[in-house]
Image: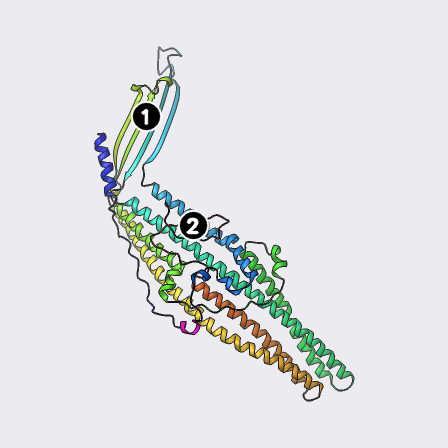
């Protein structure tokens, strides 16, 4: 009997190499040979080592410090990390399910029967003692690969969670950089508005003085005052936007707004833009994007679950064993004649509910189709994101160059207008119009610089900058990440 059951166990181990259900094949992705906008921004080759920390290319120590802090302390990243840890734990659980389940029991009883149960016996004779202990094991014989497919699904889920963590890091790094440029741009706009308000105050005083000596009139004074009040009205809204941007950065780095207000509200210049990276080919992009990798791994997990559901069309066999000892005295527990043993081979007959099983198979197939469509949609969105980022970088840089020239011309024109007014060559309206144009062009130039910087960040994010080129479909994620690490998950084989 023992030999037969052990033979069944060996046979099941050999048969476990076979599994019902479809074997996973990487799905085809929408094909693109090249990016439409790539030739217009191919100023520098993509370098994975620099792209992994793209924020350093802006040469702004404060920005780098904020991104580094966010990668360690941002709560969205911590959520993604917790999900990754959970998927890793579930993967280990799925692997353990393929091994025998062990159990241990121990029992000691002191039983007294009533006089009605044992008539004629004394109280002491109605007292009985029993002792027992045992070790048991139950092993599901994976003839049809149900457990193997479940392990495959857990493996793919863990990889998808690792890719989700990578995608979250890319998103957070990009969000911090974008918010930082927004903040710096608002601070520059505030400085421009305040400087222009100061200039317009001097102009208003000049107009009032000219009116007092009979050179000007109240009409000129009112126009000057209207311009000053309009400029000053910009300042409160810019201050509010500055505070909102600072609060956003504080939350991104995992801090309270109050704790970082002093640091972030200290104005500074916009950093210079680095050369825009070339995107490479669409196939390079799809290998780099962690969201594409996550979607592909979820298709693999759904495919494996089709096999899990299909295995329910067949009976489940379990091999059980229990070795123990029983005695009425504790001192006799380990005597030779106290040993007990149970060996069993069981079969689960739930496969007879064919209708329910086939319904679950149909649901698993539908979920696989859903995952496949989601993967293909993710690929298209990745291509769309990159194309959009490429065209924005190209056009925003051209726009920023024109706006900078306009700002310089507007400043020169305002300076000349004031001199001509002093010499009587132009009237007050021309001078006020030149000062208004200076403010508008300077403000627009700053906004153009911000748009160009944000577009550059978005291009790095679309190219999965901030995360190394790591995806390998057959690899496993590593052990949980420590807080002292940079929160990078290299996809490497671990058990």
Query: Residue 467 has which mark?
Result: none
Question: Left of 103 or right of it: where is 350?
Answer: left
**Real-space CA distance between mark 2 and mark 1, rounded to the nearest whole angstrom:** 41 Å
Q: Which residue is mark 2?
A: 84
- Residue 279 in picture, x, y percent from top left: 41, 67
Residue at (45% x, 53% y) in the render: 488
Q: Nearer the viewer, residue 170 or 374?
A: 170
- Residue 143 in picture, x, y percent from top left: 24, 42
Query: Residue 324 has which mark?
Result: 1
Q: Quadrant of residue 139?
A: top left
Q: Nearer the viewer, residue 294 or 412?
A: 412
Q: Which residues are magenta?
A: 37-45
Q: Quadrant of residue 212?
A: bottom right
Question: Left of 12 or right of it: where is 88?
Answer: right
Q: Nearer the viewer, residue 57 or 15?
A: 57
Q: Are marks 2 and 1 in contact (CB under 8 Å)?
A: no
Q: Nearer the viewer, residue 56 or 139?
A: 56
Residue at (32% x, 31% y) in the render: 136
Q: Is residue 210 magenta?
A: no
- Residue 208 in picture, x, y percent from top left: 75, 80
Residue at (53% x, 74% y) in the render: 400
Mark 1 crowdedness (10 Å alpha carbons): few <14, some 14-19, many ≥20 = some
């Amino acid at each position: 009997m023992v030999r037969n059951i052990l033979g069944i166990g060996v046979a099941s181990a050999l048969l476990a190499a076979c599994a019902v259900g479809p074997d996973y094949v990487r799905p085809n992705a929408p094909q693109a040979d090249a990016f439409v906008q790539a030739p217009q921004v191919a100023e520098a080759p993509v370098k994975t080592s620099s792209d992994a920390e793209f924020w350093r290319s802006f040469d702004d120590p404060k920005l780098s410090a904020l991104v580094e802090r966010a990668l360690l302390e941002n709560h969205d990243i911590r959520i993604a990390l917790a999900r990754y840890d959970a998927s890793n734990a579930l993967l280990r659980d799925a692997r353990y399910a393929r091994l025998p389940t062990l159990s241990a029991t121990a029992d000691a009883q002191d039983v007294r029967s009533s006089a009605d149960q044992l008539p004629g016996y004394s109280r002491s004779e109605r007292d009985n003692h029993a002792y027992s202990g045992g070790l048991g094991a139950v092993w599901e014989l994976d003839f049809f690969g149900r457990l193997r497919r479940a392990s495959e699904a857990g493996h793919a889920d863990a990889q998808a969670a690792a890719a989700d963590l990578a995608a979250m890091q890319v998103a957070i790094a990009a969000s911090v950089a974008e918010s930082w440029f927004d903040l710096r741009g608002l601070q520059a706009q505030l400085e421009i508005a305040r400087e222009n308000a100061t200039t317009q105050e001097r102009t208003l005083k000049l107009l009032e003085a000219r009116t007092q000596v009979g050179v000007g009139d109240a009409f000129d004074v009112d126009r000057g005052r209207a311009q000053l009040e309009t400029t000053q009205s910009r300042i409160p809204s810019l201050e509010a936007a500055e505070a909102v941007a600072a609060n956003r950065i504080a939350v991104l780095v995992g801090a309270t707004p109050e704790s970082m207000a002093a640091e972030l509200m200290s104005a500074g210049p916009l950093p210079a833009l680095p050369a825009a990276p070339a995107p490479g080919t669409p196939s390079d992009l799809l290998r780099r994007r962690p969201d594409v990798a996550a979607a592909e791994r979820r298709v693999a997990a759904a495919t494996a679950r089709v096999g899990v559901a299909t295995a329910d069309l067949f009976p489940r066999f379990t091999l059980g064993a229990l070795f123990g000892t029983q005695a009425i005295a504790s001192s006799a527990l380990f005597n030779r004649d106290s040993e007990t043993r149970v060996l069993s081979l069981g079969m689960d007959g739930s496969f007879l509910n064919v209708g329910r099983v086939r319904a679950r198979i149909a649901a698993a197939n539908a979920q696989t189709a859903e995952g496949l469509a989601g993967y293909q949609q993710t690929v298209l969105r990745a291509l769309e994101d990159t194309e959009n980022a490429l065209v924005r970088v190209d056009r925003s840089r051209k726009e920023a160059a024109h706006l900078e020239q306009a700002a310089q011309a507007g400043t020169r024109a305002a300076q000349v207008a004031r001199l001509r007014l002093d010499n009587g060559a132009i009237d007050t309206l021309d001078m006020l119009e030149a000062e208004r144009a200076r403010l508008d062009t300077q403000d627009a130039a700053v906004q153009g610089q911000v748009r160009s910087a944000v577009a550059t960040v978005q291009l790095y994010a679309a190219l999965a900058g901030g995360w190394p080129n790591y995806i390998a479909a057959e690899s496993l994620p590593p052990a949980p990440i420590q807080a002292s690490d940079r929160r990078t998950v290299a996809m490497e084989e671990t058990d």
